[in-house]
Amino acid sequence: MAEEQSQHYTGLKRTMGLFSAFTLVVSSMIGSGVFKKVAPMTAELGSPWWVIMAWVGAGLVSLIGALTNAEVAGLIADPGGQYAYFKRMYGKAFSFSFGWTSFAVIQTATAASVAYVFAQSLNSLVPLPHLSAQLEQYQLLDNLGVKLVAIGLITLLTIINYRGVENGGFVSNLIASTMVIAIFSIVIIGLGMDGGTMDHFYNAPSPTESLTTSAVFTVFFAAMMQAFWAYEGWNNLGFMGGEIKNPTRNIPLALILGVGVVMVVYTIINFTYLYVLSPSELKIIAADSNAIAGIEVIRKLLGASGVIIVSVLICVATFGSTNGVLLTASRLYFTMANDRLFFKQAKVVHPKFKTPSASLVIQGVWSSLLVLSGSFDMLTDMLVFAAFLYYGAMAAGVFVLRKTEPNSPRPIKAFGYPVLPALFIMFCVVLVVSSVIERPQESVYGLLLIGSGLPFYLAWSKNSKADKVES
């Protein structure tokens, strides 16, 4: 009966089981970061051991976040994910700020950034056209061929998901399974062939040899910010609360299993990169905006033929990751529109495909504009800063709900409560403060985008109250 009521309220269909939910978590996370971020992280830290620690540290923090989020996901299995959680924890104003920020930067910039790396990978296979050097001095026209391909990918995936949740779920299942197999193939090639050495780990200087303790802390946090981009997306599954079977059980389990698997995969694949490429080689790669570490590893081991294989692999990964973001986040804006706190067109459900069709289109248009607006790293730094503001608030909400709803059923309780959730909150605070200090420009842009929702909230909230009075 509850499921029927939920479907009647949303107009969406519950068609996704546990395996589809799990693979959606994995495909939403495994995208561009696992192939690209090791180079800038090595440029910042220098030592491969420290780079591995940054990846493991970011994974453990993400896992603690998933374990904490699992309690709330089991308690509140409504469409909209964190938007629905925040509405129950803190009220509609705060939940709107999360939804608007997701639309302005967190989710749409994720889709834009991953689609951009898809186009970069395609560019390594088939050089895409460039404008003249004089025209490319302008930000909107720089790398225009790559940007247009990225926009084409967003458009294609919007159409696929427009035509049914089963289509998007099938793409996620297929690509997630293929990606895990393919990544471990890279590991076997990288560790099994001559060309790599453990000397890269033992001969590189540690940052502690040349930096003060406070400077090491700052640099390490900056590197972890890079790794967090690769882990971003683990919480998107909650947006699909109206389309997952038995959501109070399957959403928490899929979160925990998905983040755990991805953490293991990331640690192993990055160890392989660092085993094959020296820190000096990775620093050169980091300086080239179109270079991707995953491609250079295979270029060194297998030559041009290997580059074709791994470039196709990265295209597959980023295709799947972009699909995961577009599929899930569109349900957030759909839920907001049903609360009369978003563009009213976004609440339209397609009569045949039973998808939030208008929400998908609105999301696709804005993501495409973000592709044109800036570089990959600026977008990802901006969205990680914004995301952790709300990750911390989500963890704090566990304490709020334990107090306000002590008797509500909790299929899964936060692991290590209250210590681990409290540590996660503290980490989020430190990371946000560190981001403001280390990347003030990106942080200011993120805050401006968050604040840009205020006039919309005032207008939509006023209209919502007027509608209630009329009814």
Image (cartoon, rainbow, N blue to C red):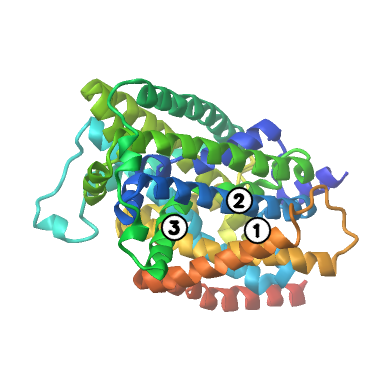
Report the disc number at residue 82. Answer: 1
Which amino acid type is marked by label 2?
Asn
Q: Tell me: 223 left or right of 64.
A: left
Residue 20, position in %: x, y? 64, 33
Q: Tell me: 123 left or right of 26.
A: left
Residue holding disc 2? 235
Q: Quadrant of residue 463?
A: bottom right
Task: Give yes or no for contact between labels 3 and 1 (Cβ–Cβ under 8 Å).
Answer: no
- Label 2: which secondary element: helix
Task: Give yes or no for contact between labels 1 and 2 (Cβ–Cβ under 8 Å).
Answer: yes
| Distance in Å between CA atoms under marks 2 and 3 | 17 Å
Point 70% across, 47% down: residue? 241
Q: Going from the N terminus, do you reach mark 1 or mark 2 first?
A: 1
Which amino acid type is marked by label 3?
Met
Q: Going from the N terminus, do you reach mark 2 or mark 3 first?
A: 3
- Label 3: which secondary element: helix
Q: Quadrant of residue 281?
A: top left
Point 72% across, 45% down: residue? 252
Local crowd size for mark 2, using a 10 Å CA cut-off: few (<14), some (14–19), many (≥20): many
Point 69% across, 55% down: residue? 68
Local crowd size for mark 1, using a 10 Å CA cut-off: few (<14), some (14–19), many (≥20): many
- Label 1: which secondary element: helix
Residue holding disc 3? 225
Q: Quadrant of residue 317?
A: top left
14 or 95: nearer the eye?
95
For the N terminus, the quadrant is top right
